[in-house]
Image: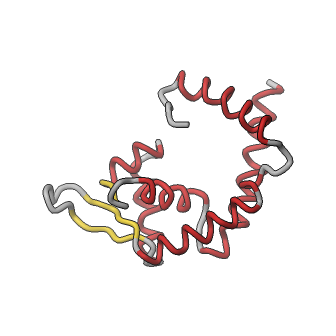
Amino acid sequence: MAVVTSIMRAQQIIQVRVDEMLAPFGLTFARFELLRLLAFSRAGALPLGKAGARLQVHQTSITNVVTRLDERGLVTVKPDVNDRRVTRVSLSRSGTSRLRKANQLLAEVDFGVGELDKSELETISALLFRVRAEHGDAAR
């Protein structure tokens, strides 16, 4: 119970810190995470369903995030040219610029976990990866 409570409380603290840092960019962590995912993709674009699956969020949640980003001009949403039933979300130039600035700020403050050194962060990441992998989340 102590471990679970500590993880849950630390997550809440980090979430608040990160969201406060991202607020000036008009982003939440969920929106930042989608922009980051799109930036990592080969073409800067993914089908909406694939983006949701990779982020392991419900279709309604990914649609909401995409809608908010589209309203701000940070992504574009279009039917797939090969399959019009599929919606593709793409990182816009404005989204790329905003992501770069937000990422730089988060990196400067160690993504809200500056109290921990590199070795501690690697240990925590490795331990939690085992829990995540056991449940099908194999992304590091």
Q: Is residue 138 above or below residue 103?
A: above
Expressed as whole percent of the image width and height from the top left, the position of residue 96 reads 48, 70
Q: Residue furthest front?
A: 118
Q: Residue furthest right?
A: 115
Residue 21 figure quarter: bottom right
Residue 116 located left or right of residue 106: right
Expressed as whole percent of the image width and height from the top left, the position of residue 109 reads 77, 60
Q: 47 or 64, which is in the foreground?
A: 47
Residue 79 located left or right of residue 19: left
Residue 80 figure quarter: bottom left
Q: Is residue 115 above or below residue 100?
A: above
| Label tally | 0
Q: Residue at x 69, y 61 (%)?
A: 106
Expressed as whole percent of the image width and height from the top left, the position of residue 37 reads 46, 54
Q: Quadrant of the N terminus?
A: top right
Expressed as whole percent of the image width and height from the top left, the position of residue 26 reads 59, 74
Q: Residue at x 66, y 29 (%)?
A: 126
Q: 25 or 118, which is in the foreground?
A: 118
Q: Residue at x 74, y 30 (%)?
A: 123
The colour scheme applied to this rendered structure is: secondary structure
Residue 1 located left or right of residue 139: right
Q: Quadrant of the C terminus?
A: top right
